[in-house]
Image (spheres, helix red, strand yellow):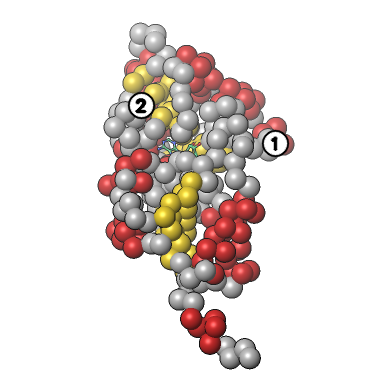
Amino acid sequence: MFTGMEQSLIPAGKLWLVGAGPGDPDLLTLRAARLLGSADLVVHDGLVGEGVLALIPPHIERISVAKQRSRHMMRQDLINALLVRETRAGKQVVRLKGGDPFIFGRGGEELDAARDAGIAVEVVPGITAAAGCAAQAGLPLTHREDASAVSFVAGQCKDLTDQDWSGLAGHGRTLVIYMGLATAPAIADKLIADGVSPGLPVAVVERGTAADARVLRTLLADLGDLVAREKVQSPALIIVGKVAARADALDCLGAPGVAAQIRDFT
Ligand code: SAH
């Protein structure tokens, strides 16, 4: 006879959608660090830094759902199903994602799946790449003199041409492009075609907050060439706007006077 006791014998599982920050383990929240030490299972992305993964004690089960550029990634519905199944089995499941779970991290989809399944779920914010990479580069995303609005855009979107990008960059605004390496030349062309000045400063931050991070600075018209010339690797962030000229960075146009040109930009 079913008594209802069977269900209560399974300890209550819980899913935690946790932001791992931009890479440097020192930039984890205290809550994230605590959860990494007490979880039963950690399900993580490829973007989570080695230093962060090293904080997971060896006895804690770990599953990588890393997404390769080849696009042979674990499908999102399979990840959702895995998270629900393991949580229902009574585990404390940490879903560890680069940056913040809700900024281009599909955390919203995982939250929906958890709610639909009726499992306990909590979100732990992380420092998103834009904030972490910019701060590390000495680049204020807003500044009373230069920018009072910031936009985060996914550069891999296929429909670049469908939108008017002129409202995203230019006077008084900062544009931060995630996942924009492959489309950098098209993005620069599109912004310029939509009326943004080709002389607007740009900073490209590669592996932001890592010990070997690179910060490259140029002007919008040179963005595509810079990415190719410097063989910029993923993960990288593209920051477009007057504040980019404030970055503690290499100036990469290679021509004399470029730094002065960037600083004099108005
Ligand atoms: N949820 C993440 C973003 C995931 S999308 C967050 O909040 O940061 C992945 C993109 O984030 C990369 O293609 C890159 O554009 C950016 N990114 C993440 N970490 C980065 C890092 N350490 N340095 C530069 N860019 C980074």
Tell me the quadrant of the picture where the N terminus can be found: bottom right
Residue 220 in the image: state x and y as whole percent: 51, 23
Is 107 placed above or below 99 here? below
Q: Is residue 137 left or right of residue 175?
A: left
Q: Is residue 222 visible?
A: no
**Residue 70 on image: x %, y %:** 60, 31
Separation (CA) of disc 1 from disc 2: 29 Å
Q: Residue at x 60, y 45 (%)?
A: 74
Q: Amino acid at mark 1?
A: Asp
| On screen, residue 29 above or below 191 | below
Per the image, the residue denoted by label 2 is 214
Which mark is drawn over residue 60?
none
Work out which residue is located at the far front of the displayed protein and give it.
Answer: 1
Quick one: label 1, few (<14), some, or many (20+) residues within 10 Å? few
Q: Residue furthest top?
A: 256
Q: How many marks?
A: 2
Q: Measuring from the top left, give residue 107's x and y in whole percent.
A: 53, 55
Of 211 and 45, the residue lying toward us:
45
State the SS at label 1. Answer: loop
The residue depicted at 61 percent of the width and 63 percent of the height is 113
Q: Residue at x 68, y 35 (%)?
A: 158
Name the mark on residue 159: 1
Taking depth in this image into account, of 164 and 48 the one nearest to the observer is 48
Residue type, mark 2 in image: Arg
Residue 186 falls in image quadrant: top right
